Image (cartoon, coloured by chain):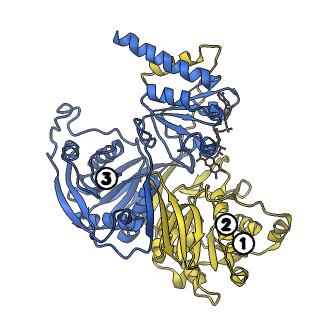
Chain colours: A yellow, B blue
Amino acid sequence: MRVLVLVKYVPEITSDRVMDSGRLVRDPAVGLMNELDEHAVEAALQLVEALPDEDARESSQIIALTVAPSTGDMAIKKAYQMGAERGIRVTDDAFAGLDYHGTAAVLAAAVRRLGSDDEGPIDVVLCGLTALDGLGSVIPAMLAEELGWPQLTHSRAVALGADGRSLNTTRETEESVEELTAPLPAVVSVTDAANEPRMPNFKRIMAARTKAVEEWSAADVEPFLEDFAPRVSVVDAAVHPPRVAGDVVVDRGEGGTVLANYLIEKGLV
Amino acid sequence: MTQPTILLALPSAHARVDEVRNSSLELITLARSLGRVDVVTMGAPSTEVLALLGLYDVEAVHQAALPTAVPEEQQRVTSNLAAVMVAAARKVHADVLLLPNGFAFKEIGAVAALRLKAGLVTDAAGVRWDAPGVLHVAKRVFGGTWDTVAEVRTDPAVVTVQANTVVAEPVGVGVGGVGVGAGGAGIPRVEALLVDLPPCAVTVKSREVSRKDEGRPDLEEASVVVAGGRGVNGDFGPVEELADVLGGAVGATRDAVFEGWFDRYIGQTGVTVAPAVYVAAGISGMPHHVSGITGSGQILAVNNDSDAPIFEMSDFGVVGDLAAVLPQAAETIRAWRAGREG
Ligand SMILES: Cc1cc2nc3c(=O)[nH]c(=O)nc-3n(C[C@H](O)[C@H](O)[C@H](O)COP(=O)(O)OP(=O)(O)OC[C@H]3O[C@@H](n4cnc5c(N)ncnc54)[C@H](O)[C@@H]3O)c2cc1C
């Protein structure tokens, strides 16, 4: 089985984020792999480990992919530490500031290119539910649509079907909980309830340090790339005025009344 | 340019559309400021629903007619709902598609946008025409720390809009008085929308509609939210009591949900809320949680640790035990109401 995991480096969520010309400027000093992507890597590892056939397990491959500037290597390295075998970073000036559609188009081109090499087709693309820096949570669905593959998103459980050629997932959204099934190849996104990401062991951490990240440019994916021109552009970006801390009172037996009076005086009751 | 046509999805939990959520009325109000409004439904709207839509000046309801061979739960697969939106957009030559901002609708909007070659903006906090054919969409990003404006020039544009972005108002409010729908278009006409579904490889084996918090407003839409964290120590009673006194929804942190004390949590991987009043009880204020509440009007906190980060972003805070403070607050409000009435 060949599994591709999409990973992304994001700024540390507590750090101040800086925007320039409508784009997020990523500071490599403060950041990490998007936490939900760790759940995607873990899901990929578990899918492979659950294969009943030892040869199938041995011949399986987990590839981590990111479309990002060089800071993206931090996300690939984290995937290496957890157990991914191969890592690819797609970087090109032409791909800076992609909108949702452009991102999905470039990711789809990379999937097609991998599927056209002589190591066999990609069976599953796994991703985190959402990147914690952009929060769109639409990329997995759009990638599936670009590829013409079924989408199994918002999965809190993922398992290979008994036939070995399908996936069963539990999809949980605000509306419902569904048991879904679809044939491979498919795009799957996982929630943070899907699994508990493993801690990398020392051996893997050391190996990841020196393991190279393959770099692809636009020319490498271009033969597989359809229209990726932006359909949305950011025309304005400004810092939102931070919230100013208001009064804090210490409860000496009347705290609830003070709270209630605050609401009443503001006309909020 | 002739008047633009704005198309919006009217969600319903059941096959028959017998209620209109407040978030839908907000969406219609917003749509009306952009052009004439058509809505899409998956089922037949009731007479009451049609009358209400009329008060909001909806022109037409397009009721999707799917191939009868497609079973009910299968109709709700993202690919199929996107096909419905695409069919409706083509039929009415929509200039803008507006959808609610839940996870499921974002995906439907995203897939529809690709099929229509449309620009997509999610999590919108404001939408307006900058010039004919040039849509400007405001949104807060990065945990509420930045305000951005995105420009979409595609025809159509697809936008998912956060709840509480505008106040729902029928036509004629402030002009012809409430309720009579002065200037409204009357009862909207209902048209069948024929939809050809592309083959769909995803099969729904079972589907269970999530239980709603009975008698309380939806968490995503509520104008008051009282949320509990690890500090409630297993007892959501005080949180629920204050929420009910204020007519609000109950929320939680992820930690409280993972403990099994409540079922839905607010934050980056949970629900985003933007109520007029948000009360955080026994919540420390970690970034993952607070990025889901930054759109709130007033943030109030009750925490027994005066150094809890939640106080740094609160408009008002009480350092104390929530098990004592919340019931007292609820009681004070009840007494104040009783005093006013009698
Ligand atoms: C990938 C990822 C995604 C996440 N997404 C989310 C998310 O979407 N939403 C979310 O909420 N969290 C999320 N989290 C978890 C988040 O980081 C925090 O761990 C969580 O929000 C903390 O919850 P809490 O405030 O209830 O608990 P704590 O941080 O333990 O805070 C409890 C607070 O209660 C106070 N307290 C204790 N007893 C009392 C009392 N009797 N009266 C008053 N106060 C009391 C304490 O002083 C403390 O401040 C995520 C984490 C990760 C890694």
What chain letter is assigned to the residue under label 3?
A: B
Q: Tell me the kind of residue under disc 3.
A: Leu
Crowd around label 3: few <14 · some 14–19 · many ≥20 (10 Å): many
Real-space CA distance between mark 2 and mark 3, rounded to the nearest whole angstrom:
37 Å
Q: Quadrant of residue B131?
A: bottom left
Crowd around label 2: few <14 · some 14–19 · many ≥20 (10 Å): many
Res B10 label: 3
What chain letter is assigned to the residue under label 1?
A: A
Residue at 33 percent across and 53 percent down: it is B14
Q: Tell me the kind of residue under disc 2.
A: Val
Q: Position of residue B140 (x, y in %)?
A: 50, 47
For the residue labelled by badge 3, is the local secondary structure a helix, a strand or a loop? loop
What chain letter is assigned to the residue under label 2?
A: A
Q: Position of residue B119 (x, y in %)?
A: 40, 64
Q: Earlier in the sequence, mark 2 or mark 1?
A: 2
Q: Quadrant of residue B276?
A: top left
Q: Are marks 3 and 1 in contact (CB under 8 Å)?
A: no
For the residue labelled by badge 1, is the local secondary structure a helix, a strand or a loop? loop
Looking at the rendering, in which quadrant would you find the C terminus of chain A?
top left
Q: In this figure, which residue is indicated by the disc labeled 1?
A: A84
Looking at the rendering, in which quadrant would you find the N terminus of chain A?
bottom right
Residue at 28 percent across and 47 percent down: it is B33
Q: In this figure, which residue is indicated by the disc labeled 2?
A: A41
